[in-house]
Image (cartoon, rainbow, N blue to C red):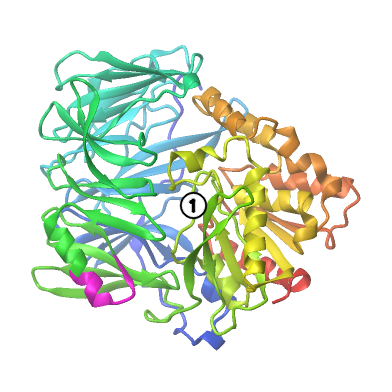
């Protein structure tokens, strides 16, 4: 290997008919099984083609997730499936009615180090052709699609690296126009030192580039008013002084105007942006107390159709009057269930709508507004009736010991009095993430078993504004951990939790918090469960050193945990005072399996007894995201048995 890393292996051009996922008929609550909760979603993130007649989705096939393309109307070859081998399926998007693209990734060994490679594949709708784009020239990162043609032609703009070596010009991504039917490429923008991100307008003109020098922690903003002018540096920022750049979310039809997000008022809001002066103008939308999520573009790509955000539950604000009316009509029709428009045809006439609640997985429906008909596409799970309601979910708020108000999602076991219940305290991963009132198979399984489940959005969580996120700085395993303990105290004070029957269960950062609880606060918890948790922050940072801009990430992590050793559970194995279950997938590409494996070894060396003080389970085929049903089932079985032994409901 000299300059270019080769193809991802195992992207199959083999298409087969995907059998309809049929399992046993749904049972009643008393007859549900652990297998019902561990089942993969039958349909996940469906996307409509521009004409609204075809659907691309991730689907459960034989206990694993596959990419599936389906025609809306019945036909002999209605459903087709793409096998991806060992590759991750990260995203997918239609380009025109006959072709779509997808981002795939895999880990490979490069010079003795595990590296994650990303690629874009193009797929013909009928399954007759699959192309790996930039396959002979791409290096490590090659899945940044910055533009898709809206005129029906099979063209995209792809930003990608051509070298893995920092000293080469090709280390910095170039932009090519790609014909996805043939893979032919035409150079549009040459690589520029330090520029990692390129941005294009709706017409396909590359208008902006974001540069970042990891050595100096400085950023720069390159801009031009059209696709022919020269780029010029229009703004700079020093990350070490907490400066940042304002980057457009959307270029409008007016070449001097854009739409951007900014948090100078305390939370993300949408503003008009003057591209000549880089000054923010009129505020377009804000959700008081909450940050905003992604924007939905209009059909032309030059205006806002809507903006998504999460309050206590996922929400959307539609600027498009037609979509706003449709949303209101559907909301009225579904009663206390929630309807979410997830994908629309280009003309807005056809759409996919998810209807469900936090206590039911719900289903996806196909809605043809011209015909006025909504038909079932797929249940999310065929294990539960569409209208079955499981354990109720609501958001509560409690005060941390320093007075900070914290929101938490509370799920109570159906049919049981909310009094002195066994409690599962479940911190989310990230930690810059958050929980909301959404269907959660872990949570609903635990509630079905008789546990109350409390999911605190502790300080440092995302979605609640800049100041709330900043309160997590320097507080990993400290005040963030106190927030979790304070949630338990709230549940006890409310009378709903038995203080002698509390267990902490979490994954990723939540797994770290569970380890920290077993080590630091064992007297408060009868047990702890960590899935894919981090035990050694220093080792995690060394692992992350493989990635570009590692220096900036190291700065960030040092802000969150200034003293890695002092808050890493692996350094305090002898202090673990409550039983802990450690589980980890060997194919985890986000958190190395060694984080749990070595924690178990340290516990053994400290005199802890396997099977009594700790239990370590390593899943040979599991990843970080439970993409295999067998791994979900094994996890729930091990979790269930561990809780029965240490904190029975």
Tell me the quarter of the picture where residue 318 sits: bottom left
Look at mark 1 in the image and give the residue it sits on.
434
Q: Who's the residue at 40% across and 68% down the image?
A: 42
Q: Who's the residue at 72% across and 48% down the image?
A: 516
Task: Report whether 285 appears left or right of 438.
Answer: left
Q: Who's the residue at 25% across and 67% down the image?
A: 78
Task: Report whether 527 appears left or right of 69.
Answer: right
Q: Quick one: label 1, few (<14), some, or many (20+) residues within 10 Å?
A: many
> Is 419 rendered above or below residue 184?
below
* On-image quarter of the C terminus: bottom right
For the question of whether residue 646 can be seen, the reply is yes
Q: Which residues are magenta?
A: 329-339
Asked which secondary structure carries label 1, the reply is: loop
> Is 638 rendered above or below residue 506?
below
Q: Position of residue 314 (x, y in %)?
A: 37, 58
Q: Is residue 629 covered in magenta?
A: no
Tell me the quarter of the picture where residue 246 sits: top left
In the image, 589 versus 646, the foreground residue is 646
Q: Residue furthest front?
A: 403
Q: Position of residue 316 (x, y in %)?
A: 28, 56
Q: Who's the residue at 44% across and 47% down the image?
A: 464
For the question of whether residue 579 can be seen, the reply is no
In the image, 438 versus 52, the foreground residue is 438
Q: Position of residue 604 (x, y in %)?
A: 86, 49
Task: Report whether 329 appears left or right of 420.
Answer: left
Q: Position of residue 552 (x, y in %)?
A: 52, 25
């Amino acid at each position: 290997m000299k300059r270019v890393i080769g193809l991802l292996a195992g992207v199959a051009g083999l298409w087969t008919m995907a059998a309809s996922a049929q399992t046993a008929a749904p049972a009643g609550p008393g007859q549900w099984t652990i297998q019902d909760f561990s089942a993969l979603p039958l349909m996940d993130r469906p996307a409509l083609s521009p004409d609204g007649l075809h659907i691309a989705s991730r689907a459960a096939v034989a206990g694993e997730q596959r990419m599936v393309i389906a025609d809306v109307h019945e036909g002999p070859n209605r459903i087709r499936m793409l096998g991806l081998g060992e590759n991750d399926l990260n995203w997918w998007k239609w380009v025109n009615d006959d072709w779509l693209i997808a981002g795939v990734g895999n880990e490979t060994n490069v010079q003795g180090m595990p590296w994650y490679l990303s690629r874009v594949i193009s797929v013909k709708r009928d399954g007759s052709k699959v192309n790996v784009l930039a396959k002979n020239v791409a290096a490590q990162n090659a899945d940044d699609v910055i533009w898709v043609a809206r005129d029906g032609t099979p063209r995209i703009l792809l930003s990608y690296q051509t070298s893995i070596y920092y000293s080469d010009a090709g280390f910095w991504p170039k932009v090519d126009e790609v014909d996805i039917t043939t893979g032919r490429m035409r150079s549009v923008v040459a690589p520029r030192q330090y520029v990692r991100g390129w941005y294009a307008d709706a017409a396909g003109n590359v208008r902006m580039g974001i540069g970042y020098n990891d050595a100096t922690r400085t950023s720069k903003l390159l801009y031009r008013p059209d696709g022919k002018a020269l780029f010029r540096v229009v703004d700079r920022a020093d990350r070490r002084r907490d400066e940042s750049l304002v980057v457009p979310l959307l270029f409008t039809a007016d070449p001097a105007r854009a739409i951007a997000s900014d948090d100078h008022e305390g939370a993300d809001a949408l503003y008009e942006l003057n591209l000549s002066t880089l000054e923010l103008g009129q505020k377009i939308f804000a959700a008081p107390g909450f940050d905003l999520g992604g924007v939905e573009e209009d059909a032309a790509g030059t205006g806002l159709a809507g903006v998504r955000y999460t309050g206590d539950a996922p929400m959307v604000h539609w600027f498009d009057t037609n979509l706003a009316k449709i949303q209101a009509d559907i909301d009225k029709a579904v009663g206390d269930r929630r309807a979410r428009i997830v994908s629309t045809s280009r003309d807005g006439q056809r759409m996919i709508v998810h209807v469900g609640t936090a206590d039911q997985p719900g289903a996806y429906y196909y809605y043809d507004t011209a015909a006025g008909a909504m038909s079932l596409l797929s249940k999310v799970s065929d294990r539960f009736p569409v209208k079955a309601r499981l354990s109720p979910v609501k958001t509560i708020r409690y005060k941390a010991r320093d007075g900070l108000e914290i929101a938490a999602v509370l799920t109570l076991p159906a049919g049981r009095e909310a009094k002195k219940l066994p409690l599962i305290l479940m911190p989310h991963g990230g930690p810059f993430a958050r929980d909301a009132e959404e269907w959660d198979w872990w949570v609903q399984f635990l509630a079905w078993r008789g546990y109350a489940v409390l999911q605190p959005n502790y300080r440092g969580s995302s979605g609640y504004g800049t100041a709330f996120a900043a309160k997590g700085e320097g507080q990993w395993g400290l005040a963030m951990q106190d927030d979790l303990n304070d949630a338990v105290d709230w549940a006890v004070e409310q009378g709903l939790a038995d203080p002698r029957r509390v267990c902490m269960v979490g994954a990723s950062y939540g797994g770290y918090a569970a380890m920290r609880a077993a080590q630091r606060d064992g007297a408060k918890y009868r047990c702890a469960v960590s899935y894919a948790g981090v035990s050694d922050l220093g080792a995690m940072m060394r692992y992350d050193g493989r990635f570009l801009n590692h220096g900036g990430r190291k700065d960030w992590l040092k802000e969150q945990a200034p003293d890695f050793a002092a808050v890493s559970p692996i350094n305090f194995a002898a202090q673990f005072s409550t039983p802990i279950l450690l589980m980890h997938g060997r194919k985890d590409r986000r958190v190395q399996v060694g984080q749990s494996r070595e924690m178990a070894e340290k516990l053994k060396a400290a005199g802890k007894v396997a099977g009594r003080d700790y239990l370590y389970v390593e899943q040979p085929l599991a990843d970080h995201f439970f993409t295999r049903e067998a791994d979900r089932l094994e996890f729930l079985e091990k979790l269930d048995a561990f809780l029965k032994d240490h904190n029975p409901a």
